[in-house]
Amino acid sequence: MKSPDELTTAFRDRGLRVTPQRQAIFRILHGSERHPTAEWVHESARVDMPTLSLKTVYQTLNDLAAMGELQALHLGPGSARFDPNDAPHHHLVCASCGGVVDLHADFTDLQVPDGLGHGFLVSSTEIVFRGRCAECTAAEDGAGEVLSASSNT
């Protein structure tokens, strides 16, 4: 993602207002590897800007997505997530905790089989792998061991 100064310039170039609130959001997103929800960005920014509204956060994130500066992720139920990583990549999504991790892998050979494309001209591929992250798997395995041990007494 571009630096806060570059995003400020990009907003102004598009005739969008640049406010201290928006600049705080730019700073939070810059260099982040998270896939934050608007609520997470809101809570993080409110540390320095207690009057920041959630509406402003959503508007800013949606403006950034419309500008191609971040990607809105549609990963299923729950809060929308946003991805500031503009390099081509895919995602691993934990079904237990909802965590999202970037997956940098090349799937350029993946194509819609002939005759099944319904006339679509595919311009990009986005792959989401779903499962359980290592932490959730370990926690679940640990809970199972505790239950098994206590049921033997």
Image (spheres, rainbow, N blue to C red):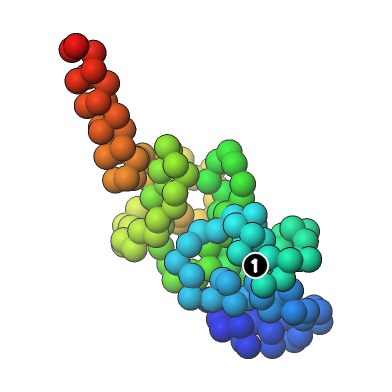
Q: Position of residue 107 (x, y in %)?
A: 33, 58
Q: Is residue 130 left or right of residue 142?
A: right
Residue at position x 60%, y 57% from top? 40
| Residue situated in front as seen by the camera: 101 or 27 | 27
| Quarter of the picture holding the C terminus | top left
Picture quadrant of residue 6: bottom right
Residue at position x 57%, y 49% from top? 74
User: Visible in this render: residue 113?
Assistant: no
Amino acid type for the residue under numbered disc 1:
Val
Residue 129 against residue 48 in the figure, above or below: above
Q: Which residue is mark 1?
A: 47
Considering the numbered disc 1 on the image, is that residue within a helix, a strand or a loop?
loop
Residue 149 against residue 98 in the figure, above or below: above
Q: Position of residue 12 (x, y in %)?
A: 76, 85
Residue at position x 38%, y 45% from top? 129
Q: Is residue 89 left or right of residue 14?
A: left
| Residue situated in front as seen by the camera: 60 or 134 | 134
| Residue situated in front as seen by the camera: 146 or 2 | 146
User: Visible in this render: residue 139?
Assistant: yes
| Residue situated in front as seen by the camera: 3 or 10 | 3
